[in-house]
Amino acid sequence: MELLTPAIGLLFWMLVVFGILVVILKVAAWKPILNGLKEREHQIQSALDLAEKTRAEMAKLQADNEKLLAEARAERDSILKAAKESGDRVIAEAKEKAQAEGKRIIEDAREAINNERAAIVSQMKKEIVTISLDIAEKVIRKELADKTSQEKLVSDLVKEAHLN
């Protein structure tokens, strides 16, 4: 039962040993432990500050990236629009040139056809005149083979000449 009700002397020495232990721990252990804790707290705080700074920089970079991406999209859209307009313009110019060239070819063909037609008509007139003269010559030779028919023709021509 002595452990349950300790003696005064034992209590005294327990208090003395406990005090010495507290002083030794205060001098030897608590200062380094507290300094380590303060240093650790400072490192954690600087790490948190660095993380916050990094997060702010990342947000700024993300905003800058979004801005650059929007500018790139706008530039892409303007380039595509300009390319489409240029392509449409080139197509329109090509159509106009093709139509003008087609009209020119048609006009040249019409002119060539008209020239050929005129040449053919002229040739046909010459041939008709030649054939008509040949026919007339043959008819006149046949009809004017005798002297009486020649005199009759001359008298008919004279009568018609006076009437006109």
Image (tube, rainbow, N blue to C red):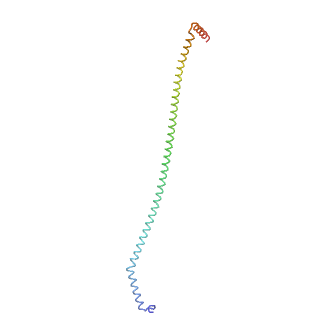
Q: Is residue 94 left or right of residue 35?
A: right
Q: Is residue 11 above or below residue 137?
A: below
How many numbered badges does the structure rendering display? 0
> Where's residue 36, x and y in %?
40, 74
Q: Is residue 116 left or right of residue 31?
A: right
Give 153 or 159, whichever is nearer the viewer.
153
> Where's residue 116, x and y in %?
51, 26
Quarter of the image holding residue 58? Answer: bottom left
> Where's residue 123, x and y in %?
52, 22
Q: Quadrant of the C terminus?
A: top right
Residue, far right: 163
Q: Is residue 57 above or below residue 97?
A: below
Give 115 or 6, whichever is nearer the viewer.
115
Q: Quadrant of the N terminus?
A: bottom left
Q: Is residue 68 above or below residue 16?
A: above
Give 86 or 99, whichever is nearer the viewer.
99
